[in-house]
Amino acid sequence: METIRGTVSKVKILKMSERPLVYFKVDEVSCLIATHSLSFLADVAEGSRVAVAGEFNGRKQFVCRKYTVIGKPQIVIEYERSKYPHKVRC
């Protein structure tokens, strides 16, 4: 299994199904993810830094098996930017 680190660009949903097929680029390397793709869409946006693990297929596309976001996931950033006030806990 190989690892690639870099910045995400061009996030596209190729196939909508129970497990969507998502295409994205990490520093000019074409990547695909199907497993955990819904979590990937929630965690990653264009410009996010990630590390992905997987292998290349016959078309020289990197098939991602695992991923991790370097820094804050996108869903956390959106929550912090929310215009609605946060609950104050006593």
Image (cartoon, rainbow, N blue to C red):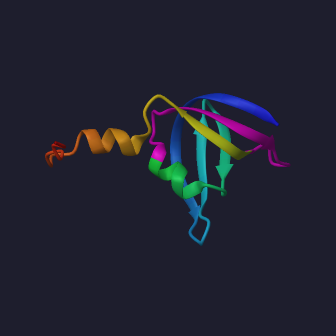
Foreground residue among 77 and 87: 87
* Number of numbered labels in the structure image: 0
- Tell me which residue sits at (52%, 53%) in the image: 39
21 left or right of 3 in image: left
Q: Quadrant of residue 36?
A: bottom right
Q: Position of residue 47 (x, y in %)?
A: 45, 33
| Picture layout, residue 83 above or below residue 17 | above
Give the side of residue 26 with respect to residue 47, left or right: right
* Depth check, front residue: 85 or 36: 85
Rendering quarter of residue 88: top left
Q: Is residue 27 above or below residue 45?
A: above
Quadrant in which residue 64 is drawn: top right
Residue 46, magenta (yes or no)? yes
Percent x, y of residue 58: 86, 49
Q: Residue 46: horizontal and vertical position, in percent?
A: 45, 39
Range shown magenta: 43-62
Task: Tell me if residue 32 is in the magenta stretch.
Answer: no
Compare residues 66 and 47 and report the one nearer the observer: 66
**At x 82% / y 48%, what residue is drawn?**
57
- Residue 77, image x and y in percent? 33, 38
Q: Residue furthest front?
A: 90
Q: Kindly identify the residue that appears in the image at 63 percent across and 40 percent down.
A: 67
Direction from residue 2 to residue 85 in the image, left or right: left
Picture quarter with the N terminus: top right
Q: For the view shown, which residue lies furthest in the bottom direction? A: 17
What quarter of the picture does the C terminus occupy?
A: top left
